[in-house]
Image (tube, grey):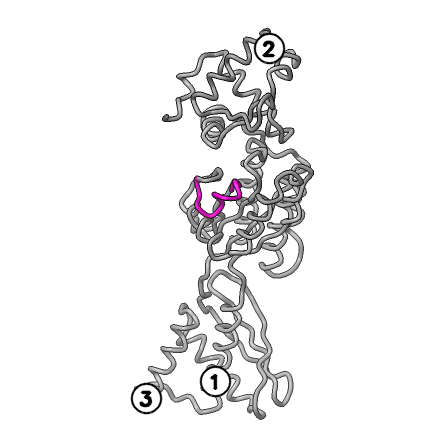
Amino acid sequence: MPTPAISELTTRAREIFRLVVEGYITTGVPVGSRTLAGGGALNLSPASIRSVLADLEKQGLLAAPHTSAGRMPTESGLRLFVDGMMQVAEPTREERAAIESRLSGPGPIEAALEATSAILSDLSACAGVVMIPQREARLRQLSLVGIADRRVLAIMVSDDGTVENRIIDLSGPVPPSALEEASNYITAHLGGRTLAEAAQAMRADIASGRSALDAASRDLIERGIAVWSEDAARRPVLIVRGQANLLDENAVSDLERVRSLIDDLENKQSVSELLDMARDARSARIFIGSENRLFALSGSSVIASPYRDREGRVVGVVGVIGPTRLNYARVVPMVDFTAQSLGKLIG
């Protein structure tokens, strides 16, 4: 049976449906007719409420996990609620301050990405995730400075303004002239290229005779480029924090689902592929339960939002992963705000 549109529900059915969904998201347990009748929001008898609940169940919006245990929203019901009824609550001043404070700490960009996943996990009580698409930096400048007989400090400035330092261990001492020649060559001939493109261009120059680099300078450049190439390959493309948040008080009765979810999170390549689906979204994208193949068995939801640099290019994706009963109205704008804050930091 196709899921009905919000407009197809009566005013009474919409209100009861909303109360069931909000009650389930808050408590994690099915909501019964007596609870609804005793809440004071409905001027209806338990019998009248049960009749409406039964109709909503027939329409595929609610389910009764056990006899006389009340109702809980189905995945279709949650999708209907999220798309047509949910009223988002902007992050509080305290939440915004906490996010901005954690992201503004000192250190390299990797530290900010770690902080992003951690703060999202803390504030949402879910697992926080940050995806960093694999992309090679483009060289703007590379300076080589001798710090010992057989050690060189390589200082690379990439096209996005990032400055990084690496130590290069050499097999023997190198004269200052070779350091200067190598630095000048890289800046003049290899700027604007990726590391792989730079290495290929240098080899092509040497093979064609266009380069007058001596052996020592060539070796320095090769080693300098190799340091960053190896480092880029080791960098994580997915940071996950807060898996322990998934083991809340409601997980005791559903340990198999939680175990399945934690196993899913270990498959970082598949999680990255899922988050990548949110790259083209203008704001947060929501995947509920079996809408995504990866978390179909664990019945989990994903809220993900892309973050961009100053040119508006998508740099990565941030989000949270948790049970389908997570507080969408609160978490969606929180993820969006975090993505915007991270984008300002990177831009």
Q: Amino acid at mark 3?
A: Gly
Question: How far is disc 2 from disc 3 in space, using C-alphas?
Answer: 90 Å
Tell me if residue 104 is in the magenta stretch. no
Tell me if residue 301 is in the magenta stretch. yes
Residue 241 to residue 42: above or below: below
Q: Amino acid at mark 1?
A: Glu
Q: Which mark's residue is nearer the viewer, 3 or 1?
A: 3
Q: Position of residue 193 (x, y in %)?
A: 40, 69
Which residue is denoted by mark 1 in the rendering?
Answer: 181
Q: Quadrant of residue 209?
A: bottom left
Q: Do the numbered discs 3 and 1 sit on residues whose CB atoms are within 8 Å?
A: no
Q: Residue at x 48, y 87 (%)?
A: 219
Q: Circle 3 sits in a helix, a strand or a loop, which is it? A: loop
| Mark sitting earlier along the chain (2/1) | 2
Q: Amino acid at mark 2?
A: Pro
Magenta part mainly helix, strand or loop? loop
Q: Position of residue 194 (x, y in %)?
A: 42, 69
Question: How far is disc 2 from disc 1 in space, using C-alphas?
Answer: 85 Å
Which residue is denoted by mark 3 in the rendering?
Answer: 209
Q: Nearer the viewer, residue 76 or 99?
A: 76
Residue 46 circle label: 2
Extent of the magenta region:
291-302
Residue at the left extreme, as displayed? 208
Residue 126 to residue 205: above or below: above
Q: Quadrant of the N terminus?
A: top left
